[in-house]
Image: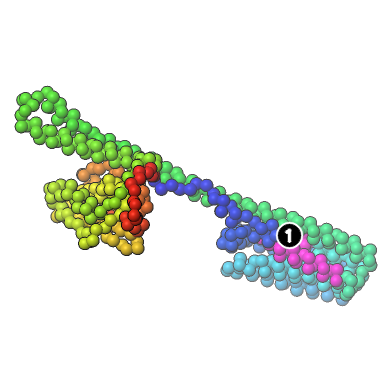
Amino acid sequence: MTQVDTTVTDEEIRDLTISPFTLHFRDRTFERQFGQNYVNQALGLTRIYMLVGVVAYVIYSILDFIVLEGDELVRVLMLRGGICLILSALVFTSFVKHSYRAMQLILSLCVAFSGGGIVFMTAVMDPPFSYLYYAGIILVIIYSSNLLIFRTAYSAALNMTLFLSYIATTLLFNPIPTQMLINNVFFLAVTVAWTMWTSYWQEIYVRREFSQRYLLRQEAKRSARLFKQAEAGNRAKSEFLAVISHELRTPLNAIIGFSEIMQQKLFGPIGSDKYNDYIDDIAYSGRHLLGIINDILDLSKAESGKLEVHEDIVDLGDMVDQALRMFRDNATKEGVRLSFDVPKDPVLLWADERLLRQVLINLVSNSVKFTQQGGEVNVKVRDLGAEGCAVVVEDNGIGIEESAIDEIVEPFVQVESALNRENGGAGLGLPLVKKIAEIHNGDLKIESEVGIGTKAIVTLPKWRMDKVNEDDPTQTPRLVG
């Protein structure tokens, strides 16, 4: 079965790391995903917080009535009313479709207008009232640092701007006593520093929590895939054991049954002609049983990296001709026509002849088995030039569903069909072909359409053909997996 990686990779973890300076994720795509998803999740609560800010700005006008009077009260109330209208418009804007894309700008304007309004009040008010309204700036700074989706960078920039604007106003436009200025600046500076610190760590926490939830979701998906894979693997192995048990029992029963008949001499002495057919049946069943066992052993060795390979010069054309001779009588009996097509010039390559012959036997055997009477199986050998060479086995049999093509080359997997059950088979042929092709640095590709037929293509690399022309190619056994 295809293996599934079930752990979060180091690269994924690095992509989700947060820059301590920009507070951005390393992966830009993930950063955009965070920006959109997190804003959408907290948008409702942020709108409520914005409305609370507007209401608070209105409520603070009570202080204006307490400490101000005359024209000064009118000016401040007009200013406060205008800012409340602007803030209300910004709240309304947050309900516009796709407004999440501009939420940083909307929140920045909220903070800029509310804080800027208080700085302006400080600039136009007469003493001693101009000394006291700095407290409103502190509230705005605290307010901005608690907006859930407001970026720390924007919040810090606006808070510093309000802080410096207040200092410039009280020094240049509407000076206040030095002692009062030092007092106000101290409390403002502490508030700015504290809120920048808390806002910084709040965003770090939010981003870490978002990335951890993302990693948990990825692990959950991997676990689900692994669980499905394990279920499929167990089911496939159970089916394989059922099939292989049947395949082994059938020839064993024949061997034992015919042997017992001969042993008990049910049809007379051993010399009787009746027993000749039984001897042939025993020999056929034995060869069939040996073939199944050899397939199991070869596949097991290939999977464990213990399959020994003896490489030498192989003529693909001759090998195809020899392999097809084995199937001519059986194909004729089944009403299937065999044909082969090879280039005029020999196609020579450096490979293990026994294993490649096994590839041909398995592919041709499958094609003959699943091609109905009157059908045709054609074997081709192709020199692909710079791409190497290929062996193509094509039939016009029952075909395979596209969704099952990847499954049939996996060990212990069989595709259910009426013809498959009728003809039997252990389901080891194609996995073994795939393994042998990979051992030879090649590939197995299967193209099929239900009711049309199947084409199996085994490609081998060019260097295996070039090696034939070396001065001293040597036969070197090796273990491969």
In this rendering, is residue 195 above or below 425?
Answer: below
Q: Give SS at disc 1.
A: helix
Residue 340 falls left or right of residue 196: left
Q: Position of residue 154 (x, y in %)?
A: 71, 65
Q: Does the image show residue 379? A: yes
Residue 434 falls left or right of residue 197: left
Q: Position of residue 318 (x, y in %)?
A: 21, 53
Q: Looking at the image, which residue is at 18% across and 47% down?
A: 326
**Residue 146 painted magenta:** yes
Q: Looking at the image, which residue is at 13% across and 24% down?
A: 263
| Three-letter amino acid code of the residue under disc 1 | Ser
In this rendering, is residue 208 above or below 232?
Answer: below
Q: Please give the range of residues in magenta.
A: 139-168
**On the rendered image, what quadrant is the C terminus found in?**
top left
Q: Describe the colour scheme in one phrase.
A: rainbow
Quarter of the image where one finds residue 374: bottom left
Residue placed under numbered mark 1 in the picture: 145
